[in-house]
Image: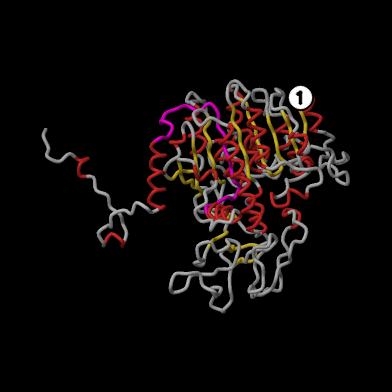
Amino acid sequence: MRSALRPAAVATIVLVSAACARPAAPPPSDNDWFESGQAAVTRARALVPPGARARSVILFIGDGMGLSTVTAAGILEGQIRGEPGEGNMLAFEELPHVALAKTYSVNLQVSDSAATATAMCTGVKTKAYALGVDERVTPGDWSTVEASRRRTLFEEAEARGLATGLVTTTRVTHATPAACYGHAAHRSWEDDTSLPPDAREAGFPDLARQLVEFSAGDGIDVILGGGRAQFLRHNQLDPERPEQTGNRLDGRDLIAAWQSRNPAGAFLWNRSQLASLDPRRVGPVLGLFESSHLAFEADRQDDIGGEPSLSEMTAKAIELLQRHPSGFVLMVEGGRIDQAHHLGNAYRALTDTIEFSHAVRAALSLTDPRETLIVVTADHSHVMTMAGYPHRGNPILGKVVSVDAGGEPDSRYLRDALGLPFTTLSYANGPGYTGASPEQPEGNKRFLHLPTGYRGIARGRPDLTAVDTTAPDYLQEATVPTRNDTHAGEDVPIYAGGPGAELFRGVQEQSYLFHAVIEALGWTDRER
Ligand SMILES: [Zn+2]
């Protein structure tokens, strides 16, 4: 059949924009936006060919790292370098493929981290607070775990002879890392003291025990994070904080148990031990650098025994795992981005996000993009928002200064309807609420690990004119008073580079991530 017009020849580009009303001006050749756009197209054309198989996978999870957090942290990083900041790229923003993930769980519109991590680590969505089990679980009921149990990415990798590793700034028994290896009807079952009495009597293993007793393959090869108290007996002194003891009441010293299961293994508890660890060693490594969560990156230098940064732990984990002949699966969590947001403290959330970006950069420099798939995502978002027409280069943690009629930065703060200045970043809910209320929430101090010098909560919408809102301990204002800020429910980004990265496209259910990783690794013969 002959046709004067082949369909491809009549392709039409429709730009839905009011600007289309005018004929396009010829592109200026001396325009940075234009030239950087052309360079980005050239880079996109030179990508790893689709269909390549990944030998190893690194899954980076910024806990609570929604898009407003990514944008604001990118600006802060640029501004720390003395730039306006808006065009700064975090390491993972340079990755070539992007998708969006829907993060709702089986029973929550706005999910918790256990259900979201389970979606990514097992390929199925589940109920809130459940780990490594599908929706047949009854949250809190240990007896429903076995029938609802799902095989995790780590179990699959170990069964296939790959090495596995997990790195986190939270306790290694916390929700996100625990979803790599654990199966529980509640995320709070981190040690035996948090198990319900019937589960304890039945001998159901808590998450610290599940980590040590992980039986797939040769066990998890590299474990770096916090949470020593979950491993030590109640009468055992903590190596770094001798005024503290472990949590366990079941008589088990799980660090000793790990050591006897791994005679060639190295247990570490401080930064210098990690730094001096020979990356050519073959035995597994258990590094627990704090009795609970690690410090926020902004406070890390104050640690007693010395704590490694997320990027230091990531680099060491990759060096150790790379020696494995069959490839590896590594999960790296920037776990305290979430916890700083729960505090209502954007400074620590953003500085932890910048350190998370450093960890991704370390991984990109240590791995070969032709063999290692790197996926970077968040488990869910947070209710921090970025608003108010600040001018280009306005300090991201500062009060909004807009532009005047001539388009130049104004000399005054932008004012709200009450005539008061306000910050670019604020929260929809959380401890930064400043409205009049007889019952001010104090904040959950046990959970928050408040830094010294933490400022109390003011009453009434304050006049911020003389307040330094860029100070590390400043709590951004929140609209609704809640003890902690909450997670947010909008989709989160997934960034990917390396073999199989092209699978990360479009809008996906969060559980898709697991299946795309399986496909990239070529594990298509997988049993359910
Ligand atoms: Zn959270």
Residue 154 falls left or right of residue 308: left
Position in image of residue 342 (x %, y %): 65, 56
Comparing 377 with 212, the one in front is 377
Rendered position, 416 above or below 507:
below
Q: Which residue is mark 1?
A: 261
Magenta residues, start to end: 46-67
Amino acid, disc 1? Arg
Q: Percent x, y for residue 34?
A: 38, 51
| Side (left or right) of 284 relative to 507 | right
Rendering coords of residue 65 (x, y %): 57, 50
Query: Which corner quadrant holds the N terminus?
Result: top left
Q: Is residue 47 magenta?
A: yes
Quick check: 393 above or below 273? below
Q: Residue 235's image quarter? A: top right
Magenta region includes residue 227? no
Asked which quadrant contains residue 75, the reply is bottom right
